[in-house]
């Protein structure tokens, strides 16, 4: 157990890179727009907590291959504005710094992915949530931008249940909010298919459009590659692969060639609204 915890603490230290802070005299007020923890001072955070912003939003990103058209750090680029927008709409939440790594597959053919296995992600999430509770947060929400470790039997759900069972008698709740990923992705994919767009999954039309919308500095999306962003087809659930099919194996599942900023904005709004609705319901269940 001691070795497990030591490994978790080492991982947390490497991931955070947060320098120790020294106490300073507190200010009397805090700007209502201060909702991102990493840009706040401790007096500003303390004032925000006293004003009712007692929900901590943890949103993990990730680094993994995303096709020839999207940069490896796409999950992190998307996660930051999404969790900030969720906090803004909730009005009583603070966005925690995005955890930049998560579980993902590795491949020498498609290099660049950085895997944080569930065995390490679990204790890191647990420690971060405990830290938020020590700071005074009364509700902790765990979310992720990547699929690794998600689902009812995944690491996010198990950590949330463990900590919720531990702290709820003291008025602190910990929840896993999955719908900004699972429900929002499924619903918006269905919307696009009904509108005549191709079905897609990893690095497909949803991911690429969202990155196009958020990539205002043109650092993450290679727009000259989108016209050729066709990958392996999305296979219906339960359908066996065709033994004669030769995989494209370019990191794309689906067809991203019709990706657009307009689709990206719609998807962003849908993800945020879906998350806000679920989190409000979780907050109401306290």
Image (tube, rainbow, N blue to C red):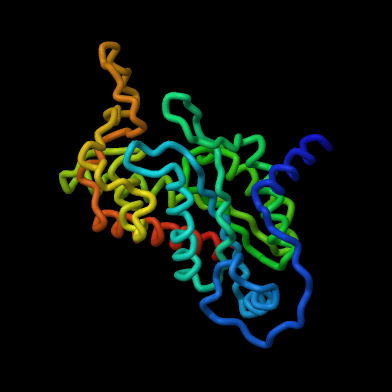
In the picture provided, is 40 more to the left or to the right than 109? right
Where residue 253 sits: x, y (%)? Answer: 32, 33
Image position, residue 224 (x, y; %): 24, 45
Depth order, front residue of 250/201:
250
* The N terminus, quarter of image: top right
Q: Which of 167 and 110 is in front in this view?
A: 110
Residue sitting at x 48%, y 51%: 76
Q: Which residue is drawn at 65% across and 77% down?
A: 44
Does the image show residue 236? Answer: yes
State the image coordinates of residue 47 (x, y, percent, origin top left).
Answer: 66, 79
Tell me which corner region of the image, top left, top right, bottom left or bottom right, holds residue 149.
Answer: top right
Instruction: Look at 29% across and 12% down and name the residue there.
Output: 243
Q: Is residue 94 left or right of residue 253?
A: right
| Residue occupying image coordinates x 44% and y 59% | 82
Percent across and percent down for residue 256 are 26, 41
Residue situated furthest left in the rendering = 196
Most extreme residue toward the bottom is 28
Quarter the C terminus occupies: bottom right
Relative to 93, say whether 234 is above or below: above
Residue lying at the far top of the rendered structure: 244
Look at the image and tell me whether residue 268 can be seen.
Answer: no
Nearest the viewer among 9 and 222 is 222
Q: How many labels does the image show?
A: 0
- On screen, residue 203 versus residue 86, left or right, reads left
């Amino acid at each position: 157990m001691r070795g497990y915890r030591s490994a978790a603490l080492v991982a947390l230290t490497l991931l955070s890179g947060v320098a120790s802070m020294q106490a300073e005299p507190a200010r009397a007020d805090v700007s209502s727009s201060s909702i991102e923890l990493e840009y706040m001072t401790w007096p500003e955070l303390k004032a925000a907590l006293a004003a009712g912003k007692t929900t901590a939003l943890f949103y993990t990103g990730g680094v993994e291959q995303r096709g020839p058209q999207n940069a490896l750090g796409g999950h992190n680029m998307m996660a930051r504005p999404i969790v900030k927008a969720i906090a803004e709409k909730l009005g009583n939440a603070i966005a925690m710094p995005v955890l930049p790594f998560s579980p993902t597959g590795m491949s020498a053919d498609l290099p660049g992915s950085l895997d944080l296995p569930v065995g390490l992600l679990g204790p890191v999430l647990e420690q971060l949530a405990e830290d938020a509770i020590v700071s005074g947060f009364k509700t902790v929400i765990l979310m992720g931008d990547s699929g690794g470790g998600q689902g009812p039997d995944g690491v996010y759900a198990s950590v949330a249940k463990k900590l919720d069972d531990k702290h709820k008698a003291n008025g602190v709740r910990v929840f896993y909010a999955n719908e900004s990923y699972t429900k929002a992705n499924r619903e918006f994919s269905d919307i696009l298919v009904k509108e005549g767009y191709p079905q897609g999954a990893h690095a497909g039309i949803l991911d690429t459009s969202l990155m196009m919308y958020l990539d205002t500095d043109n650092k993450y999306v290679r727009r000259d590659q989108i016209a050729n962003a066709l990958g392996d087809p999305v296979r219906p659930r339960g359908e066996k692969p065709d033994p004669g099919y030769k995989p494209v194996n370019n990191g794309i599942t689906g067809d991203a060639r019709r990706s657009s900023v307009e689709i990206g904005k719609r998807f962003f709004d849908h993800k945020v609204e879906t998350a806000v609705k679920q989190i409000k319901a979780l907050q109401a269940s306290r």
